[in-house]
Amino acid sequence: ATMPPLLSAIANAGRHGVLVKSAVVMERLGQVDAVALDKTGTLTEGTPRVTDLRPLTGSGLAEAELLALAAAAEHPSEHPLARAVVDAARDRGLTPAAAEDFGSTPGVGVTATVDGRVVAVGAPARLINGRTDAACAEAAVLAAELEEAGCTAVLVEADGVPVGVLGIADRLRPDAAATVTALTALTGTAPMLLTGDNPRAAAHLGAEVGITDVRAGLLPQDKVAAVREREAAGRKVLVIGDGVNDAPALAAAHTGIAMGRAGSDLALETADAVIVRDELATVPAVVALSRRARSFVV
Ligand code: ADP
Ligand code: MG
């Protein structure tokens, strides 16, 4: 028998390195007319590296101590920023202390008890949360400096007091800008950029890939709201993401695609399709495949 067009398209998508989970998904991919992209791990390679270690003046910590403390708290996290911190500590030969009571909040950061201290590591604006004491003020200035330079700044607190800021920088995927161009051509609208990261780093990256609709500082439910807003306006939105923080938006969207190589398990399970090889440029190719298959069906 001849293979039905949607099944051939699934096989073809597989050859492109995209795992499409069902014929229904294969069909829905061709219907999308708007795209929302995550930043960290999706438009960027997701293998960020620690570039700056800035202990606060009053912290009494050396650079290596600041890094070791952050690495201890980040050790159980699968977030790309956490991996960067842990790898940086290992590269310097540091052995982070054991962490207890680990907890993480998507889009915010992590907490853990390390050597009897409650350590928090995460987004400066979220952790500082309007506080204006000297340590918070110094941390905010350091974070802004690092963000202006294109870094993601990560704040480290011990027992509720900021002790230092880390600068972490990630590289754009080589095919990010071309993918944005191709998706714009296919859907007739430029993609949105949805990120939990800070507005300065987000705008910097948006400009590099040609996205002007940049929404930063989003929590997972804010990403869902941005998708729902577009869908309420009659669009069928394709969400592309990698993180635990993207899972609700991947589920809420008309179609969700997860980055497979470094994507979180939750994103891979929630998404309708998975980019198995690490090439973002396969997404427009698969949307085009779906459209061709559909034109056989109707
Ligand atoms: P994106 O939406 O771009 O993938 P996330 O929502 O995963 O980004 O993260 C948003 C922000 O939350 C990060 O830029 C960082 O400031 C903070 N954050 C989240 N998880 C962690 C973590 N494990 N360690 C440090 N910071 C974190
Ligand atoms: Mg991400």
Image: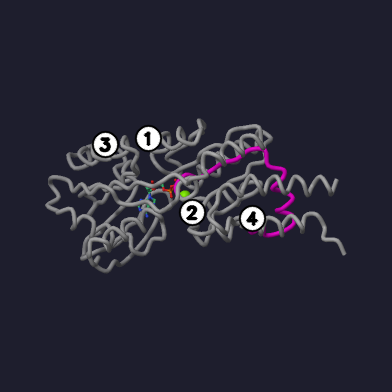
Disc on the earlier residue, 2 or 4: 4
Say which quadrant the N terminus sits in. Answer: bottom right
Report the residue that reaches farthest toward the bottom: 98
The numbered mark at residue 243 is: 2
Of residues 19 and 70, the one nearer the viewer is: 19
Disc 4 is placed on an element classified as loop
The numbered mark at residue 16 is: 4
Residue at label 1? 200
Residue at label 3? 145
Report the residue that reaches farthest toward the top: 212
Q: Amino acid at mark 2?
A: Gly
Residue 136 drawn above or below residue 20: above
From the viewer's perspective, tell me whether residue 240 is left or right of residue 196: right
* Stretch in magenta: 19-40
Disc 2 is placed on an element classified as loop
Question: Is residue 46 found inside the magenta-colored segment of the image?
Answer: no
Label 1 close to label 3 by CB (< 8 Å): no
- Figure disc tally: 4
- Which residue is pictured at 28% across the width and 58% down the height? 88
The crowd level at tag 3 (other Cα within 10 Å; few <14, some 14-19, many 20+) is some
Residue 4 appears in which quarter of the rendering?
Answer: bottom right
